[in-house]
Amino acid sequence: MTLGPILLALATPSILISGGSVLDGSGHKAVREDVRVQGDRIVEVGRLSRRPNETVIDARGEVVCPGFIDAHSHADGEILTKSDASVVVRQGITTSVVGQDGSSHFPIREWIAKLNATPHTLNLASFVGHGTARSQILGKNANRPATPEEIHKMAALVDSEMRAGLQGLSSGLEYDPGYYSATEELIELAKAASKHHGIYISHVRDEENKAIQSFTELIRIAREAHLPAQISHIKLASKPVWGLADKVLGMMRSARASGLDITADVYPYTYWQSTITVLIPTRDWSDRKAWAKGLSEVGGPTHVLLTTYSPDKSWQGKTLADISKLTSKDPVTVIQEIVSKTHGAGAKGSESVVVTAMTEPDVTKFIRDPHIMFCTDGGLTPSHPRAAGSFPRVLAEYVRSRHVLPLPEAIRKMTSLPAHRFRLDHRGAIRKGYFADVVVLNPLTVQDEASLKQPTLPPKGIDYVLINGQVVVTRRGVTPARPGRFLTRR
């Protein structure tokens, strides 16, 4: 061996994270150790002495842990223009898994090339979207059942996109065009992902009344396509299914006992954000009875907050109850007007709602389960606080305040669990030779600050974040470093 690599390593500036309590991502208790970072890797873990001219991060009284991995993210939507990804990295997220809900960039290799040519902060890994495949093969008439020939072409497209090192197949079956697909179509496309050792991840058909049937469909797809599967942002979002978390977790345990690999991710809020159309499981938007039933099952018009509405921005930030009172129109009429102007024929407007529709006991049970990891389901310009606060909220509310999880287990579910699930090579652990994605946090002060009124407020207590060995967050804020990479499945 020549001296070249050794001399280069010695010449590379190093960072010593000193005096902290290391939670290595395994779920084991903290150990007082120092961590040395050189280049993009962790090169030493133990009781270490400072080298001359070495940068030191004083972590006394703090926890040092792997960077958090967001299992369901939409950060890819703006990463080329919001390269600092500040909303995301400030909460300790170092890798976001994108291409979710059936929607991915196409062709993915072209997007990866653009990403690699644009310095950015965040690591990204991506799925190939089922809806994207549908739109490419079926064209503008994708809102219909596919023919066998079209399914064959979609499967070939998935196969081709997977060759870029993607994570697997994602679907968004509550949305167009995935809404119109048969289970058999999904099985065939999942088989194409399975050939590349990918997984199937799904925003299932119905997170409300038919949630149990929807989870059953996901398990069937996993069984018949012979691949692991994950339920995206698992929830029970209407009165008829409230309180069924134990039943859902039992279904997942039974599936694993039968040899399947079934997991989920969750965000720590009782309210979701999406399009108002998902309040009903039909595309007959003229059906007033369906809207009335959908409203009732999420708790009524006070539980539906209109966060985006381009046709009349004065409605933004108001509940359907508020708008009903303001306009002297009943809530169903208000909904139908919103849908007509944003989803009807020729409509060009946009809308988004935040709906309080889950129960805290169900959310808590999902958060506690050892096979469920965490996500934000958020982008880089959010109107839901989950995008800026999910991971600190888990640490503040469910670890420190309510003791739902011990801190080492919460960190495991944020780091090594998703790293293993998404086959991210040498990520998710504080270990020699692993990539230096590292978070330094204060477990006594970490706290989410984002709210519905101020959804982008940064959290407290996340003091340093390193991505690929570069400091991207300090106590003073986000740095100019842009070390993010596109990560492929190993």
Image (cartoon, rainbow, N blue to C red):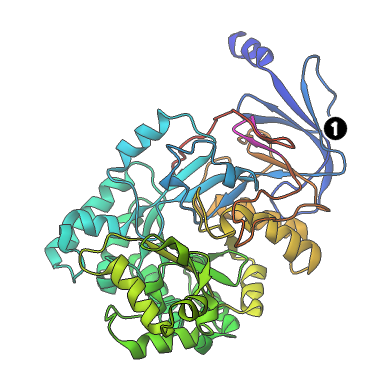
Q: 10 Å neighbourhood of mark 1: few (<14), some, or many (≥20)?
A: few
Q: Quadrant of residue 121?
A: top right
Q: Quadrant of the N terminus?
A: top right
In the rendered image, residue 14, in percent from the top left (x then y), is placed at: 71, 22
Q: Main SS of the magenta segment?
A: strand
Above or below residue 51? Residue 176 is below
Residue 482 located left or right of residue 76: right
Question: Is residue 275 shown above or below 444?
Answer: below
- Side of 357 where 461 appears, left or right: right
* The quadrant where residue 475 appears: top right
Question: From what the image shows, is residue 138 above or below residue 240?
Answer: above
Residue depicted at x 44% and y 41%: 488
Of residues 330 and 72, the one nearer the viewer is: 330
Number of labels in the image equals 1
The amino acid type, in three-letter code, at marker 1 is Arg
Location of residue 435 (image quadrant): top right
In percent of width and height, residue 157 lies at: 23, 51
In-front residue for pair 58/218: 58
Q: Residue 46, can we see it?
A: yes
Query: Observer-nearest residue: 425 or 288?
Result: 288
Q: Per the image, is 468 magenta?
A: yes
Q: Residue sitting at 48 percent across and 39 percent down?
A: 82
Q: Give the percent coordinates (x, y) of residue 340.
A: 29, 72
Q: Which residues are magenta?
A: 464-472
Give the residue at mark 1.
47
Residue 33 counted in the magenta span: no
